[in-house]
């Protein structure tokens, strides 16, 4: 074959078949965490943009569904890592809680909110889990991934963006270098999800835990 595809970018998109009560409990607990932080005087923008230790042990004890969700994220990170020819991080390392730092946050979007184009440069990969179905054609709030080459030419080029609809119980994971944004949201209900990044402290972890 004369044509070869090089430097492919793999992403992980999985729609989980979960009981409605599972997602409803996660959503309610997430709202509870936000309400607690607001009661303590924290700014809404800081709550939704800063790491918040959602998967802290105390929270997972109070809400066991969080622990299950964290494990779902870890499996997704491992599956994506193993999809690449060059990969040194193991599934066992990803499953070790000592490897994880406070890289999780709630992603709340109110009417008029949007997320500008960005990457997660201090992580290996990032992921998000959605609590609700959103009609992105009507209300916006759609995840848009950008071709990492950022090529400006129209010839000898593929599509420059890839849109992923917001779907209940959908998990999306991508490598850290994949630029992404979320279009302006105009829905009446808050658009809520949980973001978890696979932080790049693997070298330190290995130095402290030699084989």
Image (cartoon, rainbow, N blue to C red):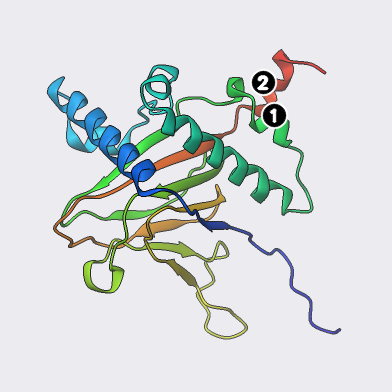
Residue 97 place in picture, x, y as percent: 58, 23
Which is nearer the eye, 173 or 67? 67
Please name the residue shown 39% across and 17% down the image.
58
Q: Which mark is residue 118?
A: none
As helix, strand or loop, the secondary structure at mark 1 comes to helix
Please name the residue shown 59% across and 58% down the image.
11
As helix, strand or loop, the secondary structure at mark 2 comes to helix
Dot 1, how many residues are within 10 Å of its Cα: few (below 14), some (14-19), or many (20+)?
some
Please name the residue shown 26% across and 33% down the image.
47
Quick check: 185 above or below 128? below
Residue 132 falls left or right of residue 148: left
Residue 195 place in picture, x, y as percent: 42, 42
Which quadrant, please, contains the N terminus?
Answer: bottom right
Q: N-terminal of the two: label 1 or label 2?
A: 1
Which is nearer the eye, 35 or 119? 35
Residues at discs 1 and 2 in contact (Cβ within 8 Å) = yes
Residue 131 place in picture, x, y as percent: 34, 49
Q: Which mark is residue 93?
A: 1
Dot 2, how many residues are within 10 Å of its Cα: few (below 14), some (14-19), or many (20+)?
some
Residue 101 falls left or right of residue 133: right
Please name the residue shown 73% across and 53% down the image.
84
Residue 92 falls left or right of residue 194: right
Name the image quarter holding residue 203: top right
The residue under label 2 is 205
Which quadrant, please, contains the C terminus?
Answer: top right
């Amino acid at each position: 074959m004369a044509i070869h595809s090089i430097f492919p970018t793999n992403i992980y998109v999985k729609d989980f078949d979960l009981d409605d009560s599972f997602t409803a409990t996660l959503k309610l607990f997430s709202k509870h965490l936000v309400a607690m932080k607001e009661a303590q005087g924290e700014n809404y923008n800081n709550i939704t943009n800063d790491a918040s230790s959602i998967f802290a042990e105390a929270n997972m004890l109070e809400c066991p569904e969080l622990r299950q969700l964290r494990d779902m994220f870890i499996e997704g990170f491992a599956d994506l890592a193993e999809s690449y020819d060059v990969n040194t991080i193991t599934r066992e390392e990803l499953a070790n809680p000592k490897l994880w730092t406070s890289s999780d946050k709630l992603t709340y979007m109110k009417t008029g909110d949007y997320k500008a184009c960005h990457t997660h440069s201090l992580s290996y990969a990032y992921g998000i889990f959605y609590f609700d179905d959103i009609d992105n054609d009507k209300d916006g709030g759609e995840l848009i991934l950008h071709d990492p080459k950022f090529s400006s030419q129209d010839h000898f080029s593929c599509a420059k963006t890839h849109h992923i609809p917001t779907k209940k119980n959908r998990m999306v994971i991508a490598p850290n270098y994949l630029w992404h944004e979320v279009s302006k949201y105009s829905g009446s209900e808050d658009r809520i999800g949980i973001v978890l990044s696979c932080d790049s402290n693997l070298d330190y972890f290995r130095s402290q835990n030699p084989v």
